[in-house]
């Protein structure tokens, strides 16, 4: 089926994030500026190509435009590290079988991990079958609220950055225009970075607007801190465990900044749902700028729940047999109008 000019302009709008009115305006401008020597039919084709080049940078990528708000991020992981460890462990246990199955090959004293997947997905042959696996494959998963340009409803989701895209600076809590591959799956966006993925800040968002987006888009994950342990246990042996997410409020009881930049900062939360217990939130050093509140502040934390042991601060040791909710934070935000000023006492906020 032949695409019409209007079809092509609509595709450019989808890829660029511009409105069809903006795209048509650029197209008409390009059409009027075509060289006089250009043939009549060719003028329209070239004007479309010039419009595509101007609004998308000329990339052939089919990544679509999205408006997103980045609300948190995992630490960068090297996916090849696990693959390599598993392959070498398998080889050590069964050298001949591992080589026969195409999992590894041996070159002198070097074990080379191979890609032995016949298909990437069912029905699609793997072009790298039998080739050495790359040394590294970095990924970073973002927690986002997303929508397509022109839409008003925010949808929760995940955005997986891959390769060199993992080094992009993350404008957390801002309205961002980006391009990505993916779609809505089971009511949530599942996006992956493309070679053209960049983060263009469209608008600063007020703290009130950030909270409104979190409160409306992430109702599925909103829970009381007191329900965190039971939620953790309910998904522990399910496929949902890896992507478990908790969005909850609590009051800051205690904070301690890490001197070592490779360590996490500690925020201890209390809440009526916890009773006399507390919840320890571990905040990566990369999110240090979000800790702009003091003790007594009510905050919203977005992160991955875990269960640890309670800590006896007087004895400075863990309490055997106890359970305590911990959250590895993707982000943490002070609720507007409900925070106190940070006061430092050494490295602790007390």
Image (cartoon, rainbow, N blue to C red):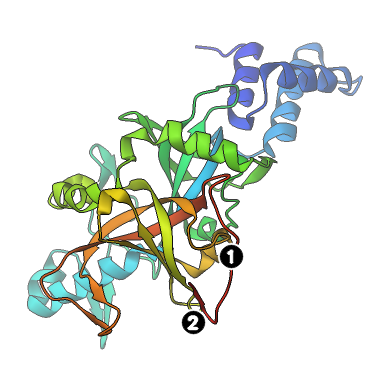
The x and y percentages for residue 302 are: 40, 50
Instruction: Please indicate whether residue 40 sits to the left or right of residue 213 in the image.
Output: right
Residue at image location 49% in from the left, 82% down from the top: 260
How far apart are the alpha carbons under marks 1 and 2?
20 Å
Circle number at residue 342: 1
Q: Give above or below for 210 relative to 102.
A: above
Residue at image location 57% in from the left, 54% down from the top: 170
The image quadrant that residue 8 belongs to is top right
Residue 303 visible? The answer is: yes
Question: Which residue position is annotated with label 2?
Answer: 260
Q: Secondary structure at mark 1?
A: loop
The x and y percentages for residue 28 are: 81, 16
Residue at image location 82% in from the left, 23% down from the top: 30
The x and y percentages for residue 52 are: 69, 29
Residue 182 visible? The answer is: no
The image quadrant that residue 5 belongs to is top right
The x and y percentages for residue 81 are: 32, 70
Instruction: Please indicate whether residue 269 sits to the left or right of residue 295 in the image.
Output: left
């Amino acid at each position: 089926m032949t695409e019409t000019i209007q079809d092509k302009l609509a595709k450019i709008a989808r890829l660029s994030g511009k409105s069809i009115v903006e795209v048509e305006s650029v197209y008409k401008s390009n059409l009027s500026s075509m060289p006089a020597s250009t043939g009549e039919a060719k003028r329209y084709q070239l004007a479309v190509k010039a419009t595509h080049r101007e609004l998308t940078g000329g990339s052939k990528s089919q990544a679509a435009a999205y408006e997103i708000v980045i609300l948190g991020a995992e630490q960068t992981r090297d996916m090849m590290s696990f693959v390599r460890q598993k392959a070498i462990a398998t080889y050590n246990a069964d050298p001949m079988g591992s080589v026969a199955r195409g999992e590894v090959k041996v070159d002198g004293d070097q074990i080379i991990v191979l890609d032995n997947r016949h298909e990437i997905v069912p029905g699609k042959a793997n072009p790298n079958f039998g080739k050495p696996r790359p040394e590294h494959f970095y990924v970073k998963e973002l927690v986002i609220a997303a929508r397509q340009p022109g839409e008003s409803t925010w949808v929760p989701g995940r955005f997986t950055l891959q390769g060199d895209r993992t080094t992009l600076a993350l404008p957390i809590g801002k309205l961002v225009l980006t391009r990505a591959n993916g779609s809505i799956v089971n009511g949530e966006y599942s996006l992956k970075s493309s070679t053209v993925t960049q983060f263009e800040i469209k608008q600063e968002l007020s703290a009130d607007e950030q909270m409104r987006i979190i409160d409306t888009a992430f109702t599925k994950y909103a829970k009381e801190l007191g329900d965190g342990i039971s939620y953790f246990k309910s998904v522990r042996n399910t496929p949902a465990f890896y992507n478990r997410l908790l969005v909850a409020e609590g009051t800051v009881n205690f904070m301690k900044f890490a001197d070592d930049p490779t360590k996490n900062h500690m925020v201890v939360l209390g809440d009526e749902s916890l009773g006399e217990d507390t919840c320890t939130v571990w905040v990566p050093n990369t999110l240090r700028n979000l800790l702009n509140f003091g003790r007594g502040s009510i905050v919203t934390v977005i992160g991955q729940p875990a269960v640890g042991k309670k800590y006896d601060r007087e004895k400075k040791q863990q309490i055997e047999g106890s359970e305590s909710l911990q959250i590895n934070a993707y982000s943490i935000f002070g609720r507007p109008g409900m925070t106190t000023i940070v006061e430092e006492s050494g490295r602790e906020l007390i």
